Image (cartoon, grey):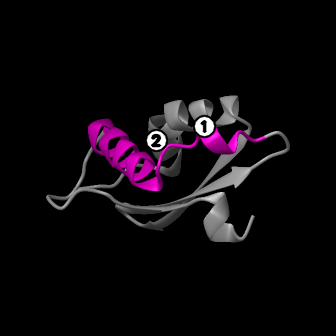
Amino acid sequence: MSSLTDADVAAALRPLSDALAADDYRLDVARDGDFAVTLTVVALDGACAECLVPAEITRRMAEQRLTAAGAAPAAGWQVQVRYPADLGH
């Protein structure tokens, strides 16, 4: 079973990235392995703090999108989410 390419991962997460961008956030994606990513949500100027859903919801949405995009192990994708509060912002 082969993992998604970085471009495939970016495409699968684009709706999530676009939704965050609408509220002045940037989504940074780092591959941690074939089926693992860390998503870092970065607040930009004018970010809407009240607009962020809980990190657990973001994690589940990302896992669903990645799994739907292609091959995944039985355990599914491993997704970690870091929010601005986690980064000391």
Q: Which residue is mark 2?
A: 8
Tell me what residue is drawn at x 46 percent, y 46 percent.
9
* Furthest-left residue in this view: 74
Secondary structure, mark 1, is helix
Tell me what residue is drawn at x 39 percent, y 54 percent.
56
The verdict on residue 1 being magenta is no
Q: Earlier in the sequence, mark 1 or mark 2?
A: 2
Report crowding for label 1: few under 14, some 14 to 19, many 20 or more residues within 10 A (C-alpha). few
| Amino acid bearing label 2 | Asp
- Left or right: 78 in relation to 37: left
**73 or 17, which is in the foreground?**
17
In what quadrant of the picture does the N terminus appear?
A: bottom left
CB-based contact (under 8 Å), mark 1 and mark 2: no
Spatial CA distance of label 1 from label 2 is: 27 Å
**53 or 14, which is in the foreground?**
53
Q: How many marks?
A: 2
Q: Position of residue 51 (x, y in %)?
A: 60, 37
**51 or 74, which is in the foreground?**
51
Magenta stretch, main secondary structure, is helix
Tell me what residue is drawn at x 47 percent, y 54 percent.
55
Q: Which residue is mark 1?
A: 51
Q: Position of residue 63 (x, y in %)?
A: 34, 49
Q: Position of residue 34 (x, y in %)?
A: 37, 63
Secondary structure, mark 2, is helix
Indicate which disc residue 86 carries: none
Tell me what residue is drawn at x 68 percent, y 69 percent.
87
Q: Residue 20's image quarter?
A: top right
Instruction: Give the residues in magenta.
Output: 47-69
**71 or 80, which is in the foreground?**
80
| Amino acid bearing label 1 | Cys
